[in-house]
Amino acid sequence: MMKRRLYFMLPNVASAERTADDLLLARIEDKHMYFMAKPGTHLGKLHEAGYSIRNDLLRGAEAGLISGGLFGLILGIVLYVIQPFGINLQPVVILALALLFGLFGAWSSSMIGVALPNSQLSQFEEEIEQGKVLLIVDIPRGRIDEVRSLIGRTHPEANARGFEPAFPVFP
């Protein structure tokens, strides 16, 4: 199942707590809500956005998997076609190299991504520094309108700040 990540800017922690309570009543699990605030802000019972949300680990791994896999695929095709050193290579070499280089690319790029801040969150930095709280909520695609409507209706102080393209459930 694919989910969508929605962003809402809230004026303060009290508003964030009320919004989280309303989302819980709407059966959005607590583990799918992440909050970011100015360093030193006590978020109470709210889940602070963790390391995997705050950095570009997943984006780095994805880019490395794609670029490494493509490189491995091309290398595998070239080696299969030219059959170097008189070795009789089988077609499975193409798949094996694509997989090997894809995994290596994902690993190496994720090491870079883990050191970089999440590029999606840079647009919120100034408001967070002013004391506002960012709500990041992951919801099934079929509930986007429902959640937007709920927050808009019950929390007019919440500023809907867009969404991130669909992503698989596992991250």
Image (cartoon, rainbow, N blue to C red):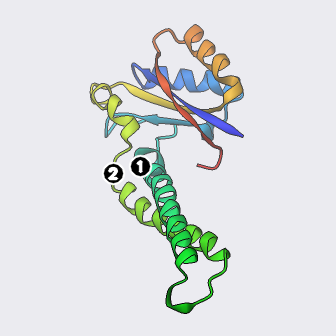
- Asked if residue 162 is positioned above or below residue 70 in the image, the reply reads above
Residue under label 2: 116
In the picture, measured across the screen, residue 141 lies left or right of residue 74, that is right
Q: Residues within 10 Å of mark 2 (few under 14, many from 20)?
A: some
Kindly identify which numbered label has been placed on residue 56: 1
Q: Is any atom of residue 147 visible in this view?
A: yes
Query: Element at badge 1?
Result: loop
In the picture, measured across the screen, residue 64 lies left or right of residue 98, that is left
- Report the quarter where the N terminus lies: top right
Which amino acid is tagged 2? Leu
Taking the spot 67% from the left edge, 29% from the top edge, the residue there is 141
Residue 89 placement (x, y as % from top left): 62, 83
**Rendered image quadrant of residue 33:** top right
- Asked if residue 66 is positioned above or below residue 2 in the image, the reply reads below
Query: Element at badge 2?
Result: loop
Mark 1 or mark 2: which comes first in sequence?
1
Q: Nearer the viewer, residue 82 or 168?
A: 82
Kindly identify which numbered label has been placed on residue 101: none
In the picture, measured across the screen, residue 127 lies left or right of residue 81, that is left
Q: Nearer the viewer, residue 146 or 14?
A: 146
Q: Is any atom of residue 7 visible in this view?
A: no
Residue 164 placement (x, y as % from top left): 51, 32
In the picture, measured across the screen, residue 160 lies left or right of residue 33, that is left
Q: Residues within 10 Å of mark 1 (few under 14, many from 20)?
A: many
Q: Are marks 1 and 2 in contact (CB under 8 Å)?
A: yes
Which amino acid is tagged 1? Asp
